[in-house]
Image (spheres, helix red, strand yellow):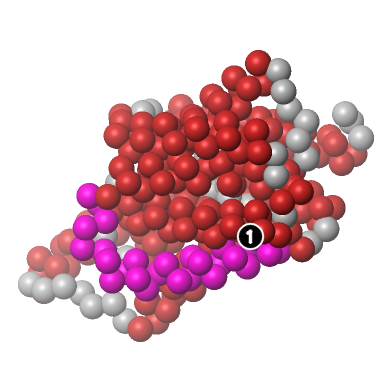
Amino acid sequence: MTWLEVSLVLLAGLWAGTINAVVGSGTLVTFPVLVALGYSPLVATVSNGIGLVAGGVSGAWGYRRELRGQGRRLALLLPASVVGGAVGAVLLLRLPESSFETVVPVLIVLALVLVVLQPRLQARLRRRAEARAAQLAVDGGPVRASRWLVGATVLATLLIGVYGGYFTAAQGVMLVAVLGSLLDETLQRVNGLKNVLTLVVNVVSAVFYVLFGYETIDWLVVALIAASSLVGGAIGARYGRRLPPTALRAAIVVLGVVALLRLLGQQVGWW
């Protein structure tokens, strides 16, 4: 790896760590860079997933204030993330790489759509939160969650965990969108919850990658992304709310499209 390539990976990891703490979808920054540098989709996904664990730690720690009072909720949802991350990692390592290369373009498109729609999702969540606040003011007490709502929340966390263990991009966006719709919480507290759940999924899948897919790991890439995303996660947690979200989303979409075109080009023999 040349110094230019090292610099590109470091910058991508820094950016991804920052975005993951605030928005999610950091993989749509690092994954295209790694694919553009010639790494296979499987090696890029596995190495990137392990490296971004460091950024997840700093991002989750930075949002620790938003986690106050959510201990019981975490105890309920963490097992779903653990199981989901394990299942997704097993699918990634057990299925042939040709299957992964076929599925990844679809997942990238899904992730990009979610990134583009995120402002509308957030606006919808804000309206929902305002309606709940008005209901509380009228009723004079908290609205209790029904059993089906609790079950739906756990199931959604499990399924998103499977997705995250298989392909990490936009699992944070998915969690914010789904949990924000199901939980009676502010978006910032949902984001803090999201950071912990995605970290758990990434840790579990990373353990499976190391134990059962060691030959697919590029440890130099892991080290570069881990070091830079650790700093990026801290930056995102502290200053991320000041970053212009429109610019971040635009860059994510551009890089995601580049990755998509490169993957499709490799499959049809364009390059």
Identify the residue at image location x=51%, y=67%.
82
Visible residue check, residue 196: yes
**Does residue 261 sit above or below 98 in this rendering?**
above
Residue 120 visible (yes or no): no
- Residue 192 spot, x, y in % from top left: 33, 52
| Image quadrant assignment for residue 148 | bottom left
Please give left or right for residue 29 compared with residue 244 in the image: right
**Type of residue at label 1?**
Phe
Vertical arrangement, residue 271 with respect to residue 74, above or below: above
Work out which quarter of the rendered image holds the N terminus and state it.
Answer: top right
Which residue, as the protein is rendered here, is positioned at the far bottom? 147
> Is 84 colored magenta in this rendering?
yes
Dot 1 surroundings within 10 Å: few (below 14), some, or many (20 or more)?
A: many
Which span of residues is magenta-colored? 65-91
Along the line of sight, which residue is nearer the eye, 84 or 137? 84
Residue at horizontal 50%, vertical 46%? 53
Image position of 131 (left or right of 77): left
Disc 1 designates what residue?
208
Q: Which residue is painted at 45% across and 71% down in the image?
A: 79
Q: Residue at x 71, y 59 (%)?
A: 212
Q: In which quadrant is the C terminus drawn?
A: top right
**Secondary structure under the numbered disc 1 in the rendered image:** helix
Q: Quadrant of residue 88?
A: bottom right
| Magenta residue check for 112 | no
Q: Position of residue 159 (x, y in %)?
A: 55, 67
Q: Which residue is outermost to the right?
A: 269
